[in-house]
Amino acid sequence: MDIATQYSSNAALHRYEHLYIGGEWVKPIDGGLAESIDPATGRPWAVVPMGGVEDINRAVAAARQAFQGPWRRMPGHERAALLRRFADLFRDAVPELSVLEARDCGGVIRDLRVSIAAQAQYYQWFASLADKAQGRTIPIDDSMHVFTTMEPIGVVGAITPWNVPLFTTCVKIGPALAAGCPVILKPSEHTSVTALELARLAHEAGFPPGVFNVVPGYGHSAGAHLVQHPDVSRITFTGEGGTAKKMLHGGIETLKRFSFELGGKAPHILFADADLEQAVNAATAMAWRNCGQSCALGSRVLVERPIYDRVVDMFRERAKTVRVGMPLDEASRMGPQANEAQLKKTLSYVEIGKNDGAELVTGGRRIETAELANGYFVEPTVFAGVNNQMRIAREEIFGPVASMIPFDGEEEAIAIANDTPFGLTAGLWTRDVGRALRVSQRIEAGMVWVNTYNATRWSAPYGGFKASGWDREMGIDALAPFLENRTTMISTTGQFPNLYA
């Protein structure tokens, strides 16, 4: 099907009318159906089911039964085999998944095809961890043998955002399933289609009933009840910090455990001795990629003063060359904001930046050409003359807005980089190896890139410092949140004194 046909107002809506619970496709009990809006057209493109409180209840019951039954007791190598089967099916489905994700969240097809293909390897990596939940022996003395064993924590609720739905789902359900935890996936109400497709793949892979459940729904109903449910042991969530605080309050009664990835305001530091062409390649890509809708992107561009004016000019010229267009067009390099509310938020921050005294170098407007007028497209935007106290430098915009901040020397760069409540990622460019080591080790961030940016691997831990989150996704560390550590102490003598003799 060609692009024009897929985006045609006359095209039939994709219809998904069933939740996936307990290994079966079931209609919502107390939810209903909702339209999913294509951000490139502003029109509905799919119909999806919305679960409610009772749907969460039956998903938790199914997951609990799976946990008490086959999944918890299944040897790790058997769980690994199922995950590998799922990874193979996922790999084969990449072309279809890429198109669906482009329609759902507005990512451009050329980027999605690469990133989604890589996720098959992520699932393979998580499969390799399924038999790695190993304990240890602790030496005490001859009278006591002490060892630890690792057990799956229980039912896991995974709540995912709308910006990169498949990826955020992958790094949550992969390690949870590998650890032996059944999962209930509650995707964003804006982007539920690919989650339902994952359920289809899981069903085909042969996971036992209840091990993987998908219940799209609204945060205030399905999401809130998942957080409060006493039989859910852990919530893993990617999203905004304010939502995370509400979740913490919702989980107080059950002393719920949480894993959070909560966004960032990453510094991308360009020292005067950097390879400027390569540094600007990365800095512009990471300011505008995915229309700025990633918590890892370097929207605070810190530039050493001797090269500041030149870099601002390079950003201005690069912004003019960005091909903003329909996500399914192979020529498009940037698509729309994922929903109308996010478009309005980004445009409001443009006004905030101007009112705070920053210089709008280029961009800052909604794109209203004939082809794009109905979608949520916004121009790549550059602000110069920004200081770190301005709101556009301190608050996560989640739009394609680069804030250019000058600095003098290492100490000031580090001070500005760390002057933020966030601490997810950071990047720096320099030819000086000593500086690279000094600065990277003083930046308060969970992931620091040197002379590159946004390079992730399934085997490397990823997560934030400070307000950017709890726990790590990816790497061996990704298993830990989904495991309990049991200590067993065995007397080698079997003797215990009578304290009342």
Image (cartoon, rainbow, N blue to C red):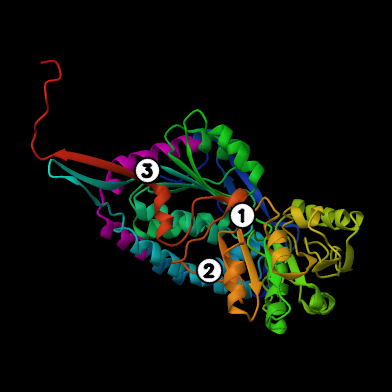
Give the extent of the magenta segment: 55-84
Residue toward you, 229 or 240 = 240
Amino acid type of the residue tagged 2 in the rendering:
Thr
Kindly identify the residue that appears in the image at 86 percent across and 53 percent down: 352
Residue count near mark 2 (Cα–Cα under 10 Å), binned few <14, some 14–19, many ≥20: few
Q: Nearer the viewer, mark 3 or mark 1?
A: 3
Q: Is residue 18 visible to the viewer in this orientation of the structure?
A: no
Q: In the picture provided, is 322 more to the left or to the right than 65?
A: right
Amino acid type of the residue tagged 1 in the rendering:
Thr
- Residue 353: which disc? none
Q: Secondary structure under badge 3?
A: loop
Which residue bears the numbered disc 1? 191
Quarter occupied by residue 367:
bottom right
Q: In the picture provided, is 81 more to the left or to the right than 35?
A: left
Kindly identify the residue that appears in the image at 72 percent across and 78 percent down: 280
Quarter occupied by residue 398:
bottom right
- Rendering coords of residue 209 (x, y %): 35, 47
Which residue bears the numbered disc 2? 456
Q: Tell me which label, 3 or 2, sits earlier in the chain.
A: 3
Indicate whether residue 77 is drawn in magenta. Answer: yes
- Residue 153: which disc? 3
Q: Alpha carbon of mark 3 to alpha carbon of mark 2: how far?
A: 27 Å
Q: Secondary structure under badge 2?
A: loop
Q: Secondary structure under badge 1?
A: loop
Kindly identify the residue that appears in the image at 62 percent across and 61 percent down: 443
Kindly indicate whether the residue at mark 1 contacts the one at mark 2 (C-beta within 8 angstroms): no
Kindly identify the residue that appears in the image at 77 percent across and 69 percent down: 408
